[in-house]
């Protein structure tokens, strides 16, 4: 037993001595290849990469297309000559492992029914979704305040939209409103300059002045609707609109009632003479406007309008608009304006044939017909439009209804004052009165 141990020990010593010499061996042979041994005594590994190829006669042959030398540098361990490889079918190009091209950014993979998983179609992401990686299976939805670009590979912030003075439409409406607001002031100047003439003194001169100022404010209140909505502007725009129009329509109603009272006061034994004057007109205007003040006060106290960011009307935009907070209150305000206009229309229509030289009841009838027609067409248009065009529709209704009232009531008088001054005399008045009788 001891002799065997001694023999094993001697062999181990010889082996260690042999390893010691082998580790120090390092030279190149005639072919230029390095010869050496590692720490375990293993020589350098060298593998040839062979490719089975079929020649034109169908015979197989092995072709060396590369080598693998693990002891070389990392970028030289495996060397392949791609041009020497011949793939199945006689092709020199690398065969594809899938039957579909790689899906680019903005697209997702959609499997083809009845075909392998490697076969798919590239489908463009839906609007509002993106894919920022190639060969993705799903698209990702953009955050609420963002939207997908045209390539569907990036989420971009949504466009903020409101009717501003910088827009072509907003600037045009603002210019039209300012120009139209100057017309009542110009007519007011004409009336003041000719205040002692019969046509100006007829039907309450002071009431005509007041009506012209209120129409000027109606034109200007449309400017409040232009610009970025905020808490104050959302409240002021509707309140100013309701109050200014209530005052103007109440003034028209007062003018109409004064015409009727003035005609009946001329009858013998009439007690209506004390009601002809500015006090009656002021009472009608105050009472007509007071109800609208109550409606607007309740509205802004319990249901105040406020600005909101609307992203539902347009997928690509965030629309800043005023939320009325209570549509019943909004339509209640419009309904009361309609009531005042209808009352003025009825009274003016009944008084249109009264024998008065400068009876303006027929002109008031036309003005109230225009007013009522505009606002009746406004309601369906208001309900069917979205975004900043809701504001455009309301501004258009304000301007057109105010312009219609102004034109029908005052332009005939201005025509006589400026172009037919001979009709604006007491002689013509007496002559016409005698003709009517």
Image (cartoon, rainbow, N blue to C red):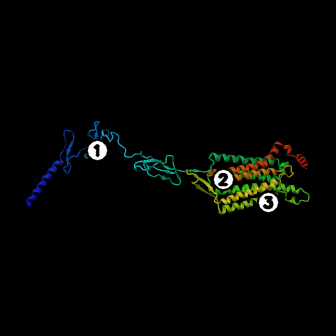
In which quarter of the view is residue 418 placed? top right
- Seen from the viewer's position, the closer of residues 370 and 324 is 370
Relative to 381, residue 84 above or below:
above
Q: Quadrant of the N terminus?
A: bottom left
List x then y, in percent, for residue 117: 40, 50
Taking the spot 86% from the left edge, 55% from the top edge, the residue there is 262
Q: Tell me the crowding category of disc 2: few under 14, some 14 to 19, or many 20 or more residues within 10 angstroms, Cα based.
A: some
Badge nearest the viewer, 2 or 3: 2
Q: Which residue is mark 3?
A: 283
User: Can you see residue 106?
Assistant: no
The residue at 66%/45% (across/down) is: 172
Which circle marks residue 78 in the picture?
A: 1
Question: Looking at the image, is 60 positioned above or below residue 351?
Answer: above
Which mark identifies residue 382? 2
Answer with left or right where residue 70 lies relative to residue 427: left
Q: Is residue 169 visible?
A: yes
Q: Secondary structure at mark 2?
A: helix
Find the distance from the CA under tag 2 to the CA under tag 3. 34 Å
């Amino acid at each position: 037993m001891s002799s065997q141990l001694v023999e094993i020990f001697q062999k181990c010593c010889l082996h260690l001595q042999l390893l010691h010499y082998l580790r120090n061996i390092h030279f190149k042979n005639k072919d230029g290849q390095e010869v050496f041994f590692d720490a375990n005594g293993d020589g350098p590994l060298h593998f040839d990469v062979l490719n089975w190829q079929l020649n034109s006669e169908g015979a197989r042959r092995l072709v060396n297309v590369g080598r693998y030398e693990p002891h070389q540098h990392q970028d030289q361990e495996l060397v392949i000559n791609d041009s020497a490889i011949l793939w199945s079918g006689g092709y020199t190009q690398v065969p594809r492992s899938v039957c579909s091209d790689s899906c680019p950014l903005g697209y997702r993979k959609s499997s083809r029914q009845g075909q392998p998983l490697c076969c798919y179609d590239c489908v463009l992401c839906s609007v509002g979704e993106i894919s920022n990686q190639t060969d993705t299976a799903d698209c990702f939805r953009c955050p609420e305040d963002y939207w997908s670009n045209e390539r569907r590979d990036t989420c971009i912030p949504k466009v903020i939209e409101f009717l501003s003075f910088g827009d072509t439409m907003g600037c045009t409406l603002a210019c039209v409103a300012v120009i139209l607001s100057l017309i009542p002031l110009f007519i007011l100047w004409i009336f003041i300059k000719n205040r002692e003439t019969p046509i100006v003194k007829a039907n309450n001169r002071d009431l005509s002045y007041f009506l012209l100022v209120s129409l000027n404010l109606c034109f200007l209140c449309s400017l409040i609707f232009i610009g970025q909505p905020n808490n104050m502007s959302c409240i002021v725009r509707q309140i100013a609109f309701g109050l200014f129009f209530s005052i103007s329509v109440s003034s028209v109603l007062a003018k109409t009632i004064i015409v009727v009272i003035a005609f009946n006061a001329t009858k013998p034994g009439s007690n209506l003479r004390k009601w002809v004057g500015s006090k009656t007109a002021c009472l009608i205007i105050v009472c007509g406007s007071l109800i609208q003040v109550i409606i607007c006060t309740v509205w802004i106290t319990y249901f105040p309008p406020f600005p909101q960011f609307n992203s539902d009307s347009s997928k690509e935009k965030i629309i800043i608009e005023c939320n009325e907070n209570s549509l019943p209150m909004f339509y209640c305000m419009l309904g009361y304006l309609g009531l005042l206009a209808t009352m003025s229309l009825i009274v003016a229509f009944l008084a249109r044939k009264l024998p008065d030289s400068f009876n303006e009841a027929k002109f008031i009838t036309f003005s109230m017909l225009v007013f009522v027609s505009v606002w009746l067409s406004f309601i369906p248009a208001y309900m069917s439009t979205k975004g900043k065009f809701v504001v455009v529709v309301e501004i258009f209704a304000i301007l057109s209804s105010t312009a219609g009232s102004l034109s029908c009531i005052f332009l005939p008088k201005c025509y006589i004052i400026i172009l037919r001054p001979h009709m604006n005399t007491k002689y013509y008045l007496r002559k016409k009165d005698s003709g009517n009788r």
